[in-house]
Every structure is written in C-alpha cells, then in structure tokens.
Image (cartoon, coloured by chain):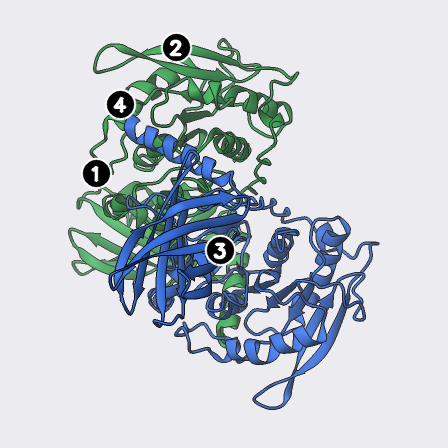
Chain colours: A green, B blue
Amino acid sequence: MTLSRHLLFTWLLATLTTLSLHGADLSGKWTSEFDSQIGLQKYVFEFEMDGDKLTGTASYDHSMGKGTATLQAIELEGDKVSFTEPLEAQGMKLTITYEGTLAAQEMKLSRHVGDFATEQIVAKRAPIPHVDAQGRWVAPHPERNIPILPALAAPEDTSFYAERDVPHGKVEIVRYPLSAGGDKQMHVYTPPGYNPDDSATRYPVLYLNHGGGENDSHWTESGKTNYILDNLIADGLARPMIVVMPDTSGVVSGNVPQLGEDDACTTEYLQDILPYVDSHYRTDPRRESRAVAGLSMGGFVTLNTGFSHLETFGELYVYSSGYWPTMVEQFEQNFAPILNDPAINEKFYIPIYFGVGETDIAMVNSMKTEAVFARHGIRRYSVLSSHGHEWLNWRRYLHQTAQIMFPANR
Amino acid sequence: MTLSRHLLFTWLLATLTTLSLHGADLSGKWTSEFDSQIGLQKYVFEFEMDGDKLTGTASYDHSMGKGTATLQAIELEGDKVSFTEPLEAQGMKLTITYEGTLAAQEMKLSRHVGDFATEQIVAKRAPIPHVDAQGRWVAPHPERNIPILPALAAPEDTSFYAERDVPHGKVEIVRYPLSAGGDKQMHVYTPPGYNPDDSATRYPVLYLNHGGGENDSHWTESGKTNYILDNLIADGLARPMIVVMPDTSGVVSGNVPQLGEDDACTTEYLQDILPYVDSHYRTDPRRESRAVAGLSMGGFVTLNTGFSHLETFGELYVYSSGYWPTMVEQFEQNFAPILNDPAINEKFYIPIYFGVGETDIAMVNSMKTEAVFARHGIRRYSVLSSHGHEWLNWRRYLHQTAQIMFPANR
C-alpha cells in the first residue's frame, strides 16, 4: 500500500483503540422506536466525541414529519446521560429533554416534550458497520479476545480418547417424544459431578451429530466422545458440558432449506429435541451455551439447522462436510439474509469451524462451502488435517474444538 | 447422505487406501511424447490392476494415424516393467516391445519396433484428477502427512521473541546490484552455525516482506525475526534457515498482475534478489526450499510474485493481507490458469497460509482473497487470531509458520 494508505490504517487503528478503552461509550448511532400521542416515532441519535466535546444529532420520522435536529446540552457523567432536542411544531418552539442511563448496548431515557408529555424510551446501539466504504474491516477491539485454537492431536495419538483414571461422566440412552407421534432414542453424556438435583448449576450443551448410515451410538462407540470429554475436563482444558447425540437418520438432508421453512431435522430439533433436553437436564438454555457440531452428513445439521437458527445456537462446528458443489450457489442464495447481515460476526464470538482432511472425499465440498462464508467476511476457524473421511480425524476435531467451546465468564 | 452414498464413500476410501500402499504403482495414466522415424508420436498408456492381474491400453497419435491398442504380456516385478503393443501397419503385423524401470512419477522405457527401430522414451504419470465428476475430492494418501499447525502464541506472550541465552544467528545488511542499475540494501539472517565456507550444508530460504511505509529493517527491528528463529531453532521447533528481508517499497503493488507479465517486484525478485542470494549464500535453490511470506503490503509479494511463480517458490504465507475487494475478481480472472490447474494441490505440500486478526483492517480483504483459493479447492492453512493490524500479530504468525516451513526429509 502507499504510504498515505498506511498512515490511514495507522490512524484508524489508533482511533479504534482509543474508542475501545471506554466502557459505556456514547459515540455512535442509537435507534429508538416508541409510541406517543402522535403515534409511532422513529429516532436515530448519532453522537460524536472529540476530546471532551460531545456533539450529536437526532433524526426523527413520525406522523408530523421527518427531519434532523442538532442536539444541545449533551452531558455524560459516568453512566448518566442527558441532552435536549429543539422542536418547532405548528409555530411553537419547544424543547424536548432526554435524561437517563447509558449501558454498552442501550440507553434508557425519559423523554419530556415541554410540559405536554413524558415517554420512557429505549435507544439501542445500532450495529457497527463492520466494513467501510472501501471494504476495510472496521471493528472495535472486543471485550474478550477470540480463543486460540489448540493444535490438532497427532494422527497416531490415541491417549486423548483413552479411558484414563480420571472422574468419568455418564452416558445414558434416553427416549424423547416426537411431536409427530411416537418416540426416539438418543445418547446423552453428562459430565463428572453432574447432579440432576442441583438446580444451581447449569451446563452448556453440545449437540453432536453422526454421519450417514450411522446413528446415535456412533459418537460414543467410534468417536469416544465420553472419554475425550472426561480427559479434557480432568485436565482443565474443556468446560464441563452436556453432550446430546441424537439419531437424525432419515430426517437430516444435504439439501439447502429455505429460510423460514424448517426441514424435518430442524423441526425435530426445535420442537422435540431441545425442549426435551432443556426440561430434563440442568442446561443453560441461552444460545451462547448451545453448540451444534456434526460429521459428514451431520455437518448438514450444523448448516441447515444451526446456521438458520442463530437465535438458538451460538456455536457451529462442521467436521468433514459441506454442500455438494452443485448446491453451494443455492446455499448462498437461500441464506443471503443471514450471510449479508452486517451484524453477523457479532453472533460468532466463537467463529464457525470447518475441519477437513487432505484426503477427505468431502474436502472440496467443505472448501467450497467455507468459501461462501469467507467471501462474506464471516469469522471462521479453518483446519486442514492429514488423513481422510474417518474417525481418526473426527475424534481429533472434537478434541480440538471442545477446548474452545463455551468460554467461561463471557 | 443416503446409505448408498455413504457406502460409495466407504468403497472409495478403501480403494484409495489400497492403492496408496503401493510405492511404485503402475496403475493409472502415463503420457509420453517422443521423436521417431515417423515424426513426433504421442502416447497415453493406461494400466489397471485387478488383484494380481494387469491390463492396459496404449492410445497413440502420430503421422500414420490414431488408435488404441490393447497391451499384452504386461509384467511388473519390483521396479522392472515390460509389455508389448501389437502393431499392424501397411499390411505388416509387428510387435512393439517396451521394457524399463518404473518410479513413482515416471517410467523410463526402451521401445523396440520389431527389428526396425529402438527409441528411449519417458512416460510421465498424468496428474491424478483430484475431483471426480460429482465434485468429490479423490486423492491418494500422500507419502508424508500435512504438518499440524501449532497453536498461535498467546497475545501476551513475549518470551518467544525475547533474546534468550541460546546460540544466535547473524543479521547482516548487504547490498545487491539491480539489473536496472544501481544497488539496494537488504537484511539477511543466517542461522546459528552457518558457515559460508561449508559447501556441504545447504539451507532453505524464507523471503520475508515488510508492510507499507516500512523497509528491510522492520522484520528484525519490530518483528524480532532473528530472536524468533534463534529460539525456535534452539528448541528444535524450526529448521535452520536463511531469512532474506528485502526492501520492496516502491516496487510492490496491490494491483493484480497478468500472468506472464511480471510486475516490478517480481522482476526484481527473479532478476536481482534470488540470483544474488543463491550466489552469495549456501542456499538450497529448489522451489520446495524457498518460501515467501509478507505482512500487509508485503502479502502482495506472496501473491503477485510467489503465487505466479510456483516453479520458483514452494511455500506461501500471507499475513494480514489480501486484495482489495474490488480487485478480487480480477485476481480470479488473471490467475485462472493457476487456480484451475488440476495439479495445483500437488504444488502445495505445505498449504498456502492466511493469518489475520479479528480487528484487523485487512480482515475482509484477507477473507475474500482466501475465498478464491477455497472455492478452487486449494489447500490452505487459515488462522483467525485476536488483535489487529499490528506487530503483536505478525510476530505470532511468523513464530507459528516458521515451525511448519521446510519439513526435513521430504
């Protein structure tokens, strides 16, 4: 790059670093919608901080018109914020006074329109546009760094999934009711120390999906999931978690769903599997405590079910999988609203993970699918390993990724 | 996937595993072109092995016609191979006898046409089509696994680039002549134990490029390259290597070159830098012993110079860089012959590496450029780290990647 571009980069970086030092920061865009005597009002507040000086505007859109006003008397002390908006309506000059508290992502404000009306409103921080007009990435430093992906285990290493002399979790086979009628079996791992009667402790849940022609038994029988987790937890390398291994044979599909039209697998997950797990186990039911992973055919559970329901799943892992090259374009089309969401990366504190082997028959599928995420600037972990479409790799991918799942204290 | 598709996968895998057990393997396609009394002859030999039974065909194309003959008396014992090709030309029935030796990638054969002529020919193994008609990856297990990428150093770790009490290499500033006239300065690191008079020892070379607004001093002054290498070599984690740090200010460009039309930077590399280094240092001048890496603006040396000259450079590393989004399409167009080369992955034993930070202003550029490689199924290492466009990351990327460079004994 030229020197001037380099200096611009340096300046940008310095600016971003400065901003990130402020906890509750007023600068930026805030949006608010609220009902009032004149109907729905839409506001965008925009503040700038230059040294100690605060300036700002309010753009309004309501039944009496649209416009932009320059805000006055802007004051910020700790988390207390106040400012006024001049209003001229039907020949009257009035002042709208705002006062309230500021948090990282929202302001709660009392809005006084002269002496006529008072409304309690909430202004939410607008998503930061992460790409500027030149396509550069513009993101403030996050509160917590992205975790460092540990190195893969060596292909000849069998110790990480051996039955060691450490506290063992429990694997149980349970049956859950299907809303379509009947019931179905799944394997569930609960970590060492799990106590169904301890209502104070809540665990994150990994939903771990098998490959084609397999069933809910394979992730423990061939995958050694329970030993991998036992060992990592004993060594302090993974957070104690519940691992749910359902049987998705016959419902999971390599076809790309339409957003809003859940396929059979997603429907079973949302209507049957999650409600059963969250009501029968001590789960932390927040999205950031729910991960979905799958190998080969199970990777489509990650993509079709997980990626289409980011309000439900917070972490996504694709092992040796990806859409067939003929379907990749359809994936990009059908998932465009999610792929193009400017706030998409805020939903991926733990980036989506793609792991595939250098002789893996799914290597090209995985890469071409990953390319769609990369082209949209979506945060990813991407691992190319030795070996192919085999348990030697899937055990290693689980071992590697379980170490970054559900970082504590976030 | 359906059960049948799963079984197909299993079968494919089994087939590939079987084939990979054979060192010098006759099965597959071999091509040969040679001059003869009837002019240029083009042959494609194709062999199949079914248990112990060998069958094969020869497709020929020469001045007397085109056709395919069934090969006979095919014998393979150790690396000795022989077979015959029936020939009927101008009413005469003749036998062409081939005998010679087989290696992994070529056969050297004596070709006897009856008693009339004998030619010494070489048949080369045709590149294996790595993607089948369904787009599946079809690759035999390589002789040597892809290396495991070590985990990044922690952002707060300063020990890996500290001046430790270990044997130190030497950093010298040298001037090399420019073919355009004049000369120019570069920094060169030689590892501990490097002896200019020891003609028996040859070292691989990393060409390490600075960012915009910087020069040949920054990779040692800010990047601590010499200490990073000293420490890794002392710990047995990196191979002793020469690191050449030129000053590419004013010649490197973020524009996409046309293949075959080297830009100023590539020209200087090929005409001035490499010849100087290979004639003044104990280098191993093979492509697989030459890596090119660069940060930010220097990443364009990796892409514009390195990726366009894979006959010269064997390993490519891109730190915090990538084409601007508006240029990515042109990159894909201009580099299409390389990107679409079915044998491209055979040139990347060490996959191309992209490292970028989560708040890096180059994150989107890096991802969008990487997406082109991913879409073409090209082997990559891809690392998303914490932090931004800064030395904290570039030192970590160098530390991580120096550990996979130039694997010994390959």
Asked if the residues shown at circle 2 and circle 1 are in contact, with their CB atoms under 8 angstroms apart, the answer is no
Q: Which residue is mark 4?
A: A250
The answer to which of marks 1 and 4 sits earlier in the sequence is 4
Quote the CA–CA distance across marks 4 and 3.
49 Å
Q: Which residue is mark 3?
A: B107
> Of A240 and A70, which appears nearest the observer?
A240
Quote the CA–CA distance across marks 3 and 2.
60 Å
Q: Which residue is mark 1?
A: A258
Quote the CA–CA distance across marks 2 and 1.
31 Å
Q: Which residue is mark 2?
A: A174
Query: Image point 62% across, 60% down: which residue?
Result: B391
The answer to which of marks 4 and 2 sits earlier in the sequence is 2
User: Is circle 1 on the same chain as circle 3?
Assistant: no
Is A174 placed above or below A287 here? above
Inspect the image, locate mark 4, and give the three-letter code of the amino acid beneath it: Gly
Q: Is residue A395 left or right of residue A42?
A: right
Is A258 placed above or below A343 here? above
Quote the CA–CA distance across marks 1 and 4.
19 Å
Asked if the residues shown at circle 3 and circle 2 are in contact, with their CB atoms under 8 angstroms apart, the answer is no
> Of B76 and A123, which appears nearest the observer?
B76
- Residue B236: image x %, image y %? 74, 49
